[in-house]
Image (cartoon, rainbow, N blue to C red):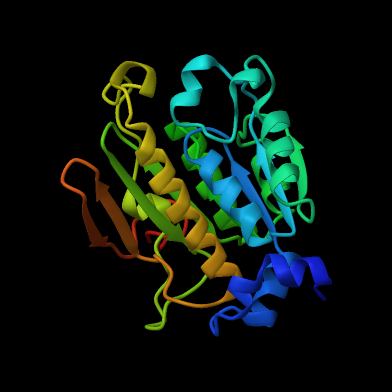
Amino acid sequence: MALDSDEIERYARHLVLAEIGGPGQAKLKAARILVVGAGGLGAPLIQYLAAAGIGTIGIADDDTVSLSNLQRQVIHGTPDIGRPKIESAAEAVVRLNPHVRVEGHSLRLNPDNAADLIAQYDVIADGSDNFSTRYCVSDACFHVRRPLVTAALGRFDGTLTTIRAHEKGADGRPNPTYRCLFPSPPPPGTVPPCAEAGVLGALAGVMGSLMAMEVIRAVAGFGEPLVGRLLMVDARSMRFETLHYGWDPDNSLSGTPQA
């Protein structure tokens, strides 16, 4: 997919990177990425995907902007309070990069609609804030064979990993699923929501930016993805650690059937 003169200047700092260059930038332009959630994680993620030249960004979110969002959801502004997040996010993308097409989906993903929507995109980036959506999205990605970049926020901590459960690793074993890492959601009430526990606003920017890097690397085809690795960020000590995890033969998606 050819770049015009404006795009060549806009993406000049990518084009001089040997790992991206013209071919990689063309891949970014041709890519279709679905972002689940235009909140704390989705806000910086969407901005950096747009700045990088992702050709089509789908945004799935059924929420409206509230004043308490603005401490971390930097794609929205004070004049956007009360507006659907997909609308204010789309306007921000157009202001940043008119070469990017935005497809808004005003809905909450569930087992009835997730697979059909996810199948329309190349890579899925899940920044949702609840366990039911995370499991729904990861299961659908497995069934329709789409890579998933998924992150989560705590009060002062965040996690990030890439799931390519529809593929096999270099050793011939299946790649792990999200359910290999987290077999089941925690009991209701054990993990307080953001409104109760709080969250460091700048941490959302860090984790959303890391999600964008993982998506861009997946599309352009450079580096080593976080498959089978969970990146853990502790903002209090500014510590980054990586936990390795593998395929669980007892997982409910790709596990070995019992005789």
Residue at point 47% right, 34% down?
Answer: 40
Q: Quadrant of residue 99?
A: bottom right
Image quarter hosting the N terminus = bottom right
Tally the numbered discs.
0
Q: In front here: 135 or 59?
A: 59
Q: In front here: 136 or 35?
A: 35
Q: In front here: 169 or 9?
A: 9
> Looking at the image, can residue 23 be seen?
yes
| Residue 186 percent coordinates (x, y) | 30, 32
| Residue 161 percent coordinates (x, y) | 39, 56
Residue at point 39% right, 76% down?
Answer: 173
* Placement of 115 over or under 228, stated as above or below: above
* Placement of 2 over or under 104, stated as above or below: below
Residue at point 42% right, 68% down?
Answer: 175
Image quarter hosting the C terminus = bottom left
| Residue 235 percent coordinates (x, y) | 24, 43
